[in-house]
Amino acid sequence: MSAIELITKLREMTGAGIKDCNNALKEANNNIEEAVKILREKGIASAVKRADRSAKQGVVVAQLSDDKKQGVLVELNCETDFVARTDKFKELANSLASFVMKSSSQDNILDQKFDDTRTVQEVIKEAIGTIGENIVLKRTAKYTTTGEIASYIHMNNSLGVLVDFEAPADVIASDAFKNLEKEIAMQIAAVSPLYITRDQVTADEIAKEKEIYVKQLQEEGKPANIIDKIVLGKLNKFYSQICLMEQPYMREEKESIKNVIAKVSKDIVVKNFARFKIGE
């Protein structure tokens, strides 16, 4: 049997990847039964068999550099809440977050070298074999700023937020700013905005909303000459739900987030944010 045929047969028997099968066959001197045993011992064969299981539990972890100029947010999924709460799984999530922090590129994270011998994907496969559940690195976010990065993690690690703020150094150093960045991160966690400002909402999304409102108003029998005015009011309400700067402040609904920020400094800008929630 040729090398290619051996690899093909071993893949059919175990579901392991080409590289893993090739390495196992070399180690087993092309003894296919021994190669199967090697893959099972390493957890690679069982890992692939579990790959179609639903991974809807997990943790969200955040890491910031000492100067808070860089920050990462990582969501790592598993099958059960029991595993998500284990130290081993949390250690894996934090080690992956540390890797993302050091990585020079956010493209193809799984294929990048985690260390001298393993890719990120291979590290995860090993963990699957050890832990016994499907594990998926669902998403990552990384920000680098000249301002400051803030993070918020809900107590059970099911929800996390990363926020990139731009502001003058003297503002960043103030106690008011430190309190504000925590409040904004918690606002994003609690109210789940989709955008920072209304100019980020796509024209297609606005058009769809307008179409819905017009049809609703026509069915209600509203006069054509006032429909446009009502639609404008509904759109403003829509923006206040999905745009961070226009959302009512969670602690005082009469205040918008834009006003809350301006009271600390008009020079503070929210540049980016990421919000990861397990199951979404």
Image (spheres, rainbow, N blue to C red):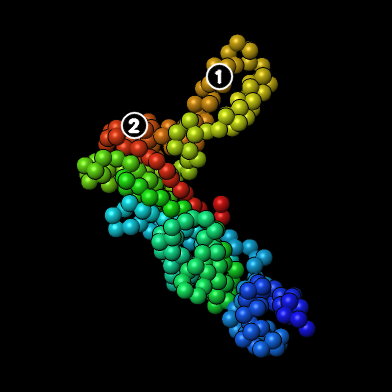
Where is residue 83 drawn, in percent x and y?
Answer: 52, 70
Residue type (three-letter) at the residue carrying disc 1: Ile
Q: Quick check: 5 left or right of 208?
A: right
Whether residue 247 is visible here, answered yes or no, is: no
Q: Earlier in the sequence, mark 1 or mark 2?
A: 1
Say which quadrant the N terminus sits in.
bottom right
Whether residue 143 is visible here, answered yes or no, is: yes
Give me the C-alpha separation between circle 1 and circle 2: 25 Å
Residue 230's disc is 1
Say which element carries label 2: helix
Q: Quadrant of residue 44?
A: bottom right
Q: Residue at x 65, y 78 (%)?
A: 22
Residue 69 vs 221, above or below: the answer is below
Residue type (three-letter) at the residue carrying disc 2: Asn
Q: Residue furthest front?
A: 2
Q: Nearer the viewer, residue 44 or 114?
A: 114
Q: Which class describes the residues within 10 Å of circle 1: few (<14), some (14-19), or many (20+)?
A: some
Residue 8 vs 198, above or below: the answer is below
Q: Nearer the viewer, residue 54 or 173?
A: 173
Q: Quick check: 200 left or right of 263?
A: right
Q: Quick check: 15 left or right of 231?
A: right
Where is residue 173 drawn, in percent x and y?
Answer: 22, 46
Where is residue 147 drawn, in percent x and y?
Answer: 31, 45
Q: Residue at x 49, y 34 (%)?
A: 200
Q: Quadrant of residue 25?
A: bottom right
Residue 259's disc is 2
